[in-house]
Image (cartoon, rainbow, N blue to C red):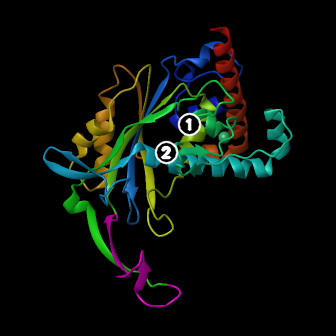
Amino acid sequence: MNGMEAVSKILGKENLSQFFADLSKPNKENAVPRGRVANVFLVILAEGELVIRHEGGEDVTLATLDGEKYPMILHEKLVSAWRREMLEQLRHDYDTHKEDLNKVRGKNDEWHCSLRPTAAAGKKEERIGGLCRECPNCMVFGYAVGEEEKYNLKSRIEGDVYLSTLPEQRSVVVRTFNAVDEPTHTTFIQSEGARTGALFRLSLIRVGTPFVGKVAMKDLSPAEFALALYSLIHTTRIGGIKSDFGKVRVIIPAIALCDHEVSSGYEMFQKVKGIDNVGEIVRKINEHVKAYEKECMVLTSNDFSPIITEVVGKNKHDIVKEAWSNGLNFKRCIEEFIKSK
Ligand SMILES: [Zn+2]
């Protein structure tokens, strides 16, 4: 099954090609955005307690909205988990179809791609290393390059914020942990010259807290779109201290195909503020997105995740291989475009 057939099956609609990029060949016009946007509406449900702090002093990242504080997940936090999930999928497929994919790559060396943040040192800023700049993950989510290439590639997936539908009082719990120091088996830890107690506190997102938000996937090929959705719904952990916390479930109640981006995490939040029942949230989001029917092709469901799992799961290598080929064609489009300018 090819990418377009998979997308039609997932969305239950035919003739969707106007909303996706045709990257079956390196056509130069694909180097620039051409108004092919899939607006994907999400509910992220905390199925375990979450640590969603960002840099800075606060334990939980909070947004003040209408005079109350609501926890939020920043898009970059979702993306780092989503990219890693996609890389796992790509590596799994590469391990079982190495020869086939090396043919698509036109290379015989061992493909490797990973997200390796390197700490800021001297005058150099922190940056992400380890990206291969050829795989579907790099071509969809983008990369920054060193001096050897002339361009940075921007992500074709954009998002804003994912806001908790429940205010801090209903969605945050403070827990005290007791870390036992391994060498001494006491709860006292020698740190920076002073002995300190090993009790520590974390503010965690309560189990069952729903977050709502939206991503805009722009100018993706059908296979890239199918692979991105499959990786997104199988992103099962986000935030800090992932071995202990962070279990989530991603629900996709609506997708609006359009020539422009519509709605936002904030707009969705306003429709579902204060609601803790996921079924009710999904119904409200369906209703909200249907209001865009005049300008977009709107598709709604209780959750698109099961059909994505089924369709992409059954045709995984076909879709991954097509996404590889599409990504490499996209790279050629850009190189051609830069050369001809
Ligand atoms: Zn890569």
Closer to the camera, 266 or 119? 119
According to the picture, the residue beneath numbered tag 1 turns out to be: 141
Mark 1 vs ligand 1: CB below 8 Å: no
Q: Where is residue 301 in the image (x, y as percent from the top left)?
A: 42, 41
Residue type indicated by callout 1? Phe
Task: Work out whether residue 164 can be spotted.
Answer: yes
Q: For residue 73, which numbered disc appears in the image? A: none
Task: Work out whether residue 301 can be spotted.
Answer: no
Using residue 316 as the reference point, say whether residue 157 is left or right of it: left
Q: Does the magenta stretch include residue 279?
A: no
Other residues around mark 1 within 10 Å, as few (<14) / some (14–19) / many (≥20): some
**Disc 1 vs disc 2: Cβ atoms closer than 8 Å?**
yes
- Residue, far left: 67
Using residue 190 as the reference point, say whether residue 335 is left or right of it: right
Using residue 150 as the reference point, say whether residue 62 is left or right of it: left
Q: Does the magenta stretch include residue 193?
A: yes
Tell me which image quadrant ligand 1 sits in: top right
- Residue, far bottom: 185
Residue 65 against residue 276 in the figure, above or below: above
Closer to the camera, 315 or 143? 143
Point out the image quarter for the C terminus.
Answer: top right
Residue type indicated by callout 2? Val
**Residue sitting at x 79%, y 51%:** 96
Q: Give the range drawn in magenta.
A: 182-207
Locate residue 272: give its quadrant: top left
Mark 2 vs ligand 1: CB below 8 Å: no
**Residue sitting at x 65%, y 48%:** 114
Q: Is mark 1 on a helix, strand or loop?
A: helix
According to the picture, the residue beneath numbered tag 2 turns out to be: 79
